[in-house]
Amino acid sequence: MSDPVLATRKTHSPLNILIFGGTGDANRIAEQLQHHYGNEVRIQLSLAGRTSAPSIPDGVLVRIGGFGGPDGIIRYIGSERIDLVIDATHPFASKISQNIAKACHAVLTPCIQYTRPAWTPEEGDNWILVNSLTEAAKILPDHGTRALIATGRQGLQNFEGLETTWLLVRSIEAPKQTFNIAWGDWIYARGPFSEDNERELIERYDIDVVVCKNSGGTASYGKILAARALGLPVIMVQRPAPQPVEQSASYDDVVQKVATHISAA
Ligand code: NAP
């Protein structure tokens, strides 16, 4: 005998889900939803178009580029008949998250914001908490003379002109806006980075302070472990506030929440 819920759903069209991505999390969520719900869902992934060769999960429709603000998202939700939006952008991509929440509220489209759990300090950590890259750059000279700047390629201008702190800037790709290091060096590298890799890098460049964002996750946690082991201070940029939409902090929880939307559709 067939499952009564699935039997009923077969007469409906699939739940149209728009996932905002640019993160591995968005790809994993898309894969899990496809795996669990198959033809019950139709998934589109929205990317900003920042990286030259983004990884995209198999079988997922992708659109690339900005929407021109909340009104563009509203138009897209309407024209594509989107039933549910999932914001799985990076915890620090605050502009797009604000725009998504604004657009979904305006047209009463349900929205789930997935945010991977933040890191929390453990014994041996010496974190200096700041609220922005501007603040991080301002206090940096008080905490070290040779810094690993592992904050990604955006906002590097904040560190421009620092003359008393030598900077080792690491990013996946070169920044789009020009950035001139007064004193320092660049490396281009893509994670994940293990504790051993990070420790070797820190020792090779004689780094005495690390600057990073509280991104959470495991891929970039190696630098936190290495700083702890070596007793180095970490200037930690804290996250922007979550949006006033349904919140989720695990893939399983997103999968369950989507089930509720499927049965309510
Ligand atoms: P942001 O400052 O919050 O957004 C700037 C603008 O980029 C948005 O207003 C929007 O343009 C467009 N945009 C961003 N994400 C988009 C998406 N998924 N689909 C369509 N348009 C998008 O974002 P950001 O910090 O520049 O991040 C850009 C992308 O890189 C995001 O997808 C994010 O997940 C990813 N990422 C960011 C970080 C980080 O540290 N910020 C780290 C890793 C990955 P319009 O206003 O024209 O719609």
Image: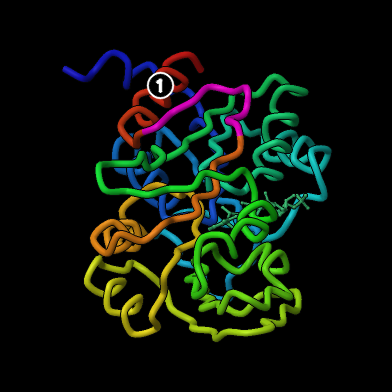
Left/right placement of residue 106 relative to residue 46 reads right
Relative to 15, is 90 above or below? below
Please say whether residue 26 is visible from this viewpoint.
yes
**Picture coordinates of residue 196 (x, y %)?**
22, 72
Left/right placement of residue 158 relative to residue 38 reads right
The quarter holding residue 77 reads top right
Q: How many marks?
A: 1
**Residue 157 part of the magenta-drawn span:** no
* SS category of the residue bearing label 1: helix
The quarter holding residue 62 reads bottom right
Q: Which residue lies at the image location 31% right of the left edge and 71% below the top edge?
A: 198
Q: Which residue lies at the image location 75% right of the left edge and 74% below the top edge?
A: 177
**Residue 247 part of the magenta-drawn span:** yes
Which image quadrant shows ligand 1?
bottom right
Which residue is nearer to you in this view: 244 or 126? 126
Q: Which residues are magenta?
A: 241-249
The quarter holding residue 244 reads top right
- Residue wearing tag 1: 9
Which residue is nearer to you in this view: 170 or 145? 145
Which residue is nearer to you in this view: 226 or 140? 140
Question: Which residue type carries mark 1?
Answer: Arg
**Picture coordinates of residue 205 (x, y %)?**
40, 83
Left/right placement of residue 65 relative to residue 14 reads right
**Picture coordinates of residue 216 (x, y %)?**
40, 47
